[in-house]
Image: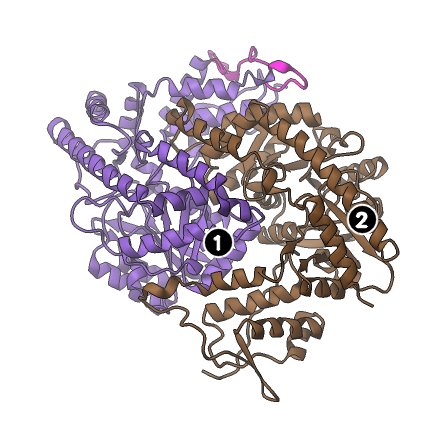
Chain colours: A purple, B brown
């Protein structure tokens, strides 16, 4: 029972919370699953910090939190142990077994974090919930659903592909007939399918660094090697991409977020766009274009997707999402691509997921057709722009000498760089103890040695008073 | 324009329709995508039949159908060509481009097939649509949704995992705490994740033959080699499995449908179940148990899942589905497995799909909690049992000397074997021309040389008068 074994700490790669909370969650998981048993010793903080490549303070904080929550017991000069008086976690046949410690922890872990800063989620409170509910009911009770509830097209409901086709053409100048659209669950599945379609296991994809860790996870799940390309104030450094392509013969694709680079929010300029298309053409690379928050453009017109400019011969896989328009938990994305690539993606989709959820797809088609989605986008755009401006104004007035940022032309987040000497991780740690969960730049770095001292702060999901509190908490927790 | 190129005919592997209709659909797709151009020559029927390993008659039938529909033109002694007067399929910027030939074809292809026999789908007409609509609305408007619309747990909504945990324990004796459940989109994703979790690319999985082709597609998508194990009147031949395991060192898993074998509907007997568990234990194989229609047991009690009998040490990945209870287009499945395996599946799920759809998951949790799902299952069970008995009675009275079958103790389909000398494919072809789409045994065969002369006929989705018509059409189209 007490033998020291290695424990598995899996840091989630999505940058949603400070690292020490990841460690907390991971250790709780190990205990819940019985891989860490009551009374068992934990590794020393120094050793664990080394193996996780984090500050020792971070592990200290995690152990402290777990001790406060009663999962761990610190025994002076002996070390830290799993508490012996934990509830029996998995009794074989006990009605009480669902007094769910997982649940309890979730609540407790939320408690110290009343102000949760997302990486750019929309405000679910604004979601047109009644309209969606009605649309879903209409879809379920309508004749189309009744006549078509067998297994369906793995590309998604025809009604939704038709609605999206109109929407993309009128909103983005993107010509994609319904037969060339694939409706996915959220954009995450689109990323996985895209990589599966153009990359063989062992081949490589270039990505922006800093960038989107969940995309890297999708590419790795498809067997791809992920190579970082630096990002600067104009977006991805295309010259560096070219030289990486020169020395990496197995490079097959490049993943970009040109409209609002994730996480830095920069819009890729026209010159770099052309150069990127040139490089892709010359090196036979597929471009995977993730246009995750196209609708949210406040200053000037949205920039047209790369997919619009690319000639037919050049493979651009274009991925969009309705989740940023509605709520992250309403999972609908879409993809269009050259038809041979799309056909491979459709085959793979069928193999891993058969098809989408028909009632939901039909309900969303209804929301697009009757204009409810556009009306919601217009309203949300006004509100989010005001929130962006409010956050920018507060930051300048309260933290003008500690941080710098470019007000982004669109999107749902601000990228806040710290003045030299300030550590984003330390600041995030302090902020969390004060009740503010904010994500430091390290979480977006593929190459940790280049980790930017910055925060990504999603402003859309917080109202103006919450944003004021956010800046207030940041300024009160600034490290010395 | 007229150069002869190779065309790609992809036969769908799901056995939903006769092969010649697959060929029709595949050629239409090639034309729509512009890979077959107006005026272009098609391969000769003999050559295409050889390359597809089908009867030449099958290709003849497909060409005939396409000619009738206007896609192809037969020019005597010259060959068959893509028609020159097709509508312009993809004009660049034309408002008419959505007069969707794809759509038109779908309708036309349905026209000659008014009675569609599924492989065992539930009857969507019985689905509790109002209840589901209300539950969805309740979920959307309720406080739980409002407070939890950020990104969520990749295992699925806690409310649904709690409801499923109760349901599985009381209905199947399966103890799976909510933390050990993973809610997937339909069981298809469960199959892919299961293979991804226990099989490295290049390793092998054994499957039942005849069996479920979409499962093979999922395993292959995960990089697995698929090896068939014969099935007889008692289910999978476990002795053959043992000898395959002996000579295949890279075998890692075995996929089974023990409750109602797909497609033969046989329930795996107790002796073979124990032997299967023994083989898995001795050879360190993971058992992937697909219990896709557990609820539908008419005669006696449902047999407990293998997962219930397996000791903790033995890895059984148990996969179930709510889609057979509601409708194929409502996509919710679930998985439980040993926690280390489940953790790998959850990680992979996050990488390919992030999480499920929260409103839908909460709505289904509501349907389970308030008893609507159980009530629906009881009602559906009564109706489907009557349909099974009606079909069996009609078959015996009209085709008693042409076919044999064992009335299955449960499930949603009948496996109808033909007396020696009758070809299931020819019969299916005749039946289709008369307006009945029925699936011949070849479509479920991994090893085509062992293809059973049989039909799988889903009776649940047809009412009694439709079933009578089905038998009538079968008996009128019996080959000589």
Residue underneath mark 1: A155
Residue A8 seen in the figure: no
Q: Residues within 10 Å of mark 2 (few under 14, many from 20)?
A: some
Residue underneath mark 2: B394
- Find out whether the residues at labels 1 and 2 contact each other: C-beta distance under 8 Å: no
Residue at 58%, 88% (x, y): give it.
Answer: B78
Q: Which disc is residue A129 wearing?
A: none
| Residue A337 lies in quadrant | bottom left
For marks 1 and 2, give the one nearer the viewer.
Answer: 2
The magenta stretch spans residue A72? yes
Residue A195 rendering spot, x and y as whole percentages: 45, 54
Residue at 28%, 48% (x, y): give it.
Answer: A294
Q: Which chain is indicated by disc 2?
A: B
Residue A325 seen in the figure: yes
Q: Residues within 10 Å of mark 1 (few under 14, many from 20)?
A: many
Span colored in magenta: A70-96
Residue at 61%, 62% (x, y): give it.
Answer: B112
**SS label for mark 2:** helix
| Majority secondary structure in the magenta region | loop
**SS label for mark 1:** loop
Above-or-below relation of A333 to B144: below
Q: Which chain is indicated by disc 1?
A: A
Residue A16 rendering spot, x and y as whole percentages: 37, 33
Out of B235 and B465, give the one closest to the viewer: B465
Q: Label 1 vs label 2: CA separation? A: 38 Å
Residue B275 rendering spot, x and y as whole percentages: 83, 38
Quick one: quadrant of the N terminus of chain B?
A: bottom left
Toward the front, the furthest residue is: B465
Quick one: quadrant of the C terminus of chain B?
A: bottom right
């Amino acid at each position: 029972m007490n033998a020291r074994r290695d424990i598995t700490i899996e840091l989630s790669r999505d940058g949603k919370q400070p690292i020490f909370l990841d460690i907390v969650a991971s250790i709780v998981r190990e205990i819940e699953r019985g891989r860490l048993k009551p009374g068992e010793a934990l590794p020393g903080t120094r050793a664990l910090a080394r193996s996780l490549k984090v500050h020792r303070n971070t592990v200290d904080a995690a152990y402290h939190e777990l001790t406060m929550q009663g999962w761990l017991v610190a025994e002076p000069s002996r070390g830290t142990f799993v508490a012996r008086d934990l509830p029996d976690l998995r009794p074989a046949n006990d009605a009480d077994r669902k007094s769910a410690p997982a649940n309890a922890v979730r609540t407790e872990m939320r408690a110290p974090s009343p102000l949760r800063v997302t990486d750019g989620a929309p405000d679910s409170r604004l979601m047109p919930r009644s309209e969606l509910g009605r649309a879903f009911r209409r879809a379920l009770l309508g004749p189309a659903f009744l006549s078509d509830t067998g297994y369906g097209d793995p590309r998604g409901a025809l009604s939704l592909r038709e609605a999206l086709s109109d929407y993309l053409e009128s909103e983005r100048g993107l010509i994609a007939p319904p037969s060339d659209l694939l409706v996915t669950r959220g954009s995450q599945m689109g990323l996985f399918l895209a990589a599966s379609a153009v990359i063989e296991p062992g081949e490589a994809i270039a990505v922006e660094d800093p960038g989107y860790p969940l995309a890297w996870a999708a590419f790795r799940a498809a067997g791809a090697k992920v190579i970082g390309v630096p990002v600067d104030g104009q977006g991805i450094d295309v010259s560096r991409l070219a030289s990486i392509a020169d020395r990496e013969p197995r490079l097959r694709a490049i993943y970009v977020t040109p409209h609002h680079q994730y996480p830095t929010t920069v819009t890729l300029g026209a010159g770099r766009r052309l150069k990127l298309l040139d490089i892709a053409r010359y090196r036979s690379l597929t471009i995977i274009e993730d246009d995750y928050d196209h609708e949210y453009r406040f200053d000037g017109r949205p920039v047209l997707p790369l997919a619009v400019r690319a000639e037919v011969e050049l493979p651009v896989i274009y991925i969009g999402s309705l989740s940023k328009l509605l709520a992250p938990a309403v999972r609908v994305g879409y993809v269009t691509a050259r038809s041979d690539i799309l056909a491979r993606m459709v085959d793979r989709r069928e193999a891993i997921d058969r098809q989408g959820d028909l009632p939901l797809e039909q309900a969303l088609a209804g929301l697009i057709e009757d204009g409810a989605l556009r009306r919601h986008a217009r309203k949300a755009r006004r509100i989010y722009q005001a929130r962006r401006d409010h956050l920018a104004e507060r930051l300048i007035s309260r933290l003008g000498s500690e941080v710098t940022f470019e007000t982004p032309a669109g999107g749902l987040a601000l990228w806040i760089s710290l003045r030299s000497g300030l550590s984003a991780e330390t600041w995030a740690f302090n902020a969390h103890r004060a009740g503010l969960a904010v994500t430091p730049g390290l979480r977006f770095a593929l190459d940790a040695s280049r980790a930017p001292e910055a925060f990504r702060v999603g402003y859309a999901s917080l109202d103006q008073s919450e944003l004021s509190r956010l800046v207030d908490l940041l300024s009160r927790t600034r490290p010395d």
